[in-house]
Image (spheres, grey):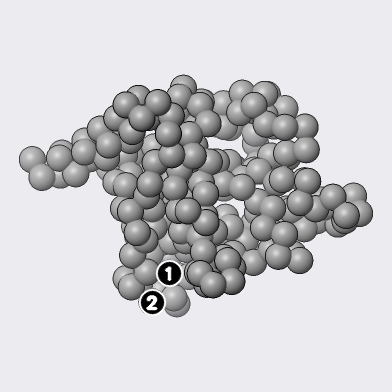
Amino acid sequence: MLHAFRIVLPILLLSTAVVAQGLNPIELPKPDTTGGKPLMQVLKNRHSSREFSADTLPMPVLSNLLWAACGINRTGEGKRTAPSAMNWQEIDVYVATAHGLFLYDPIKHVLQPVLSEDIREKTGMQPFVKDVPVNLVYVADMAKVSKASDADKSFYTAADAAFVSENVYLYCASAGLSTVVRGSVDREALAKVMKLRADQKIIFAQSVGYPKK
């Protein structure tokens, strides 16, 4: 009964926030930065998995996951858990769930609603993506790297997205979650669904959930 309550409550919180607030921002719980497994054990356990439970991630877990990905870890400086070239901080993390598409705001640590529809199936070409509780989409805001050469834009945005993705891998290894980064994405079609600007570029996606039982 307690397990069922833990699973259902986050679903109700997220869906109620989207519907009742009229697509207003959803404040995430404060991330817990005191726990986790030792680094060497996390590195040993880090791996990709394409099998996921349908169980929804509780809001505290989602909060920790997104903070680990690219949250603010030096408040006064606005610096993040993931490095970026020239401190461009050009990688945006979009969060696709059954209740809609959201943009993670690291500064406010909130989810900014983008779409109220379930677009998980559009975030990749593998069959499992439509049922994974969370699909992260890494999008480079090219307006922030406009002064770089084309070669540098491609190189650094890919590298910066990879740093964020690896943070997610390490958090998942620590928290007992399954994850896999995915390059098989119809970027043009997904960009249209997400209503991205012409100067926003999808790098890749990453699925996150509990291991399949």
Position of residue 97 measured from the top left corner of the image (x, y, whole percent): 43, 33
Q: Residue at x 46, y 58 (%)?
A: 67
Where residue 131 sits in the image (x, y, percent)? 41, 30
Q: Is residue 40 above or below residue 184?
A: below
Q: Amino acid at mark 2?
A: Pro
Q: Amino acid at mark 1?
A: Val
Q: Which residue is mark 2?
A: 38
How far apart are the alpha carbons under marks 1 and 2? 6 Å
Q: Which x, y percent locates residue 104?
A: 51, 46
Element class at badge 1: helix
SS label for mark 2: loop
Most foreground residue, 85 or 143: 143
Quadrant in the picture for the N terminus? top left
Task: Answer yes or no: is residue 54 visible.
Answer: no
Q: Residue at x 40, y 74 (%)?
A: 41
Q: Are marks 1 and 2 in contact (CB under 8 Å)?
A: yes
Depicted 78 relative to depicted 147: above or below: below
| Residue 208 visible here | yes
Identity of the residue drawn at 53% across and 31% down: 114
Where residue 12 sits, quadrant-wise, is: top left
Q: Quick check: 149 left or right of 113?
A: right
- Would you call the spot at circle 1 few (<14 residues within 10 Å), some (14-19), or many (20 or more)? some
Report the side of 39 relative to 154 (left or right).
left
In this view of the protein, which residue sits in the foreground, 117 or 165? 117
For the C terminus, which image quadrant? top left
Give the residue pinned by disc 1.
42
Check the image and report above or below for 99 versus 88: above
Task: Please give the count of numbered marks on the rendered protein.
Answer: 2
- The residue located at (73%, 40%) in the rendering is 201
Q: Residues within 10 Å of mark 2 (few under 14, many from 20)?
A: few
Q: Name the residue nearer the viewer: 107 or 116.
A: 107
- The picture places residue 19, in percent across and down from the top left corner, at 35, 25
